[in-house]
Image (tube, helix red, strand yellow):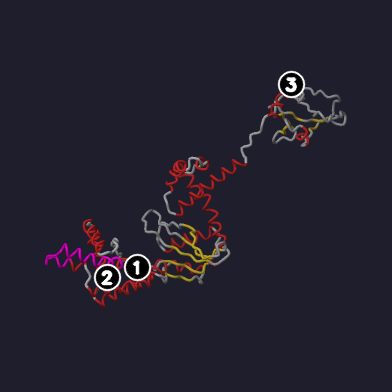
Amino acid sequence: MTTYSTESETEAESETNDENEVQTSFPTTSKSSCRKFTGAARYKSTFQNEWTVKYKTFLRQVHGNIHAFYCNVCNDVIRHKDGEDHKRWESSLRNQPILNLATSSTNTLLFNTSKAEVLAAKFIVEHNLPISVSDHLGPLFRQMFPDSTIAKNYASAHTKTNCIINDAIAPPMQQELVSQMKNGPFSLAIDGSSDNELEKMNPLTVRLFDINTHKVEGRFLDMCSATASTAQAIYDKMNEVLNKHDIPWDYCVGMSVDNTSVNVGRHNSIKTRVEDANDTVYFMGCPCHILHNTAFYGGKAFEEIVNFSADDLCGDIFYWFEHSSKRKNLLSDLCDFCDVQYRQVIKHVSTRWLSLESAVERVLKAVQPSQILLFVQYRAASKIQEIEKVIPRPNDRNLLVFLPSCATQFYVF
């Protein structure tokens, strides 16, 4: 590319610029300067912006040099605009159609395709599906909707879906949550995961009044992964997250944790450290754990009084049917005979007392068919203990009917 620099003579040599011609000159290769008057000084003129308006089809200023310019059509020598080559190239450039990719139809298709990819990513997150599912969505959509241009342009596999979730959806949602936490009261809840990897996850959730939905909402703030499960390590992660977003502890009004010494201990716990930051924070143990403990010890006292354990009965019945497809099929046939809907027996877990009500309810529905089944299979006197082990006595059945009415008070709240 050939560039040209503008120069002007001193008062000894005046120049006049014609409206249709830009006066330019080049440094001469001769050692002596060819000037009309010796001793006269030279100075460079600044490129004029109006030249780009007057010669807008070909004249451009050199970037970073206000004294130089060039022709972007033919890169020929000075005063070439009237030349044949310049006119030919300028004419072809003027007549060449401009390819505008940003048409309205293209923008609409791009927007709709991006919208579909974002909606698919949100669907995967909402239903807790593996991100690898997105590798099959594109081919699936193209088979399901062969006449859809959006399906043809859909191209969001696991890599792009991961970027959409973490870099497009999550940041504005988290920023909105942080903004509300900075300007209003909120409560926190944290619970450790049961995994045994190098880092243990401690998801930190927030409960606040959402000014957009006008409802009390629960939101996820951070995972708070820590290498240790001590009170100091968990609190440091929580405090680090709040400080990173400039969220003050002053707006925290409540904290919900498990009822362990690490969380609510009197001397060395998360509770003592949070209260050092804000002594007005109200700590509440997990309500499900509190209800579980209340119902569990109430059930133990009931067993001692009536000498009957619903836990043991439900466990024996479950394991009696669990490993035998023959018994399950016989029970299903007898349920049809007794005009009772067959339902699978539920296993009661002792660490979840609230599951006892569902297990007892299934046992009551299968009592009559089970009695017939055991009578058919174990008619011999040597098998009478098997019958007594699995089938509740008449008085025990009354107790089983009583238990669900009490258990309802502990899981409906």
**Which residue shows up at 81% across the image and 23% down it?**
34
Q: Is residue 400 left or right of residue 91?
A: left
Quadrant that contains the C terminus: bottom left
| Mark 1 surroundings: few (<14), some (14-19) or many (≥20) residues within 10 A | many
Q: Is residue 272 left or right of residue 111?
A: left
Distance Cα–Cα, label 3 vs label 2: 105 Å
Tell me the quadrant of the picture where the N terminus can be found: top right
Q: Where is residue 388 shown, x and y percent of the image?
A: 18, 69
Q: Which mark is on residue 22?
A: none
Cα separation, mark 3 vs mark 1, equals 94 Å
**Disc 1 marks which residue?**
354
Q: Write down the region rendered in magenta.
A: 361-386
Foreground of the two, 256 or 376: 376
- Name the element at disc 3: helix
Element under disc 1: helix
- In the picture, the disc for residue 310 is 2
Residue 362 lies in the magenta stretch: yes
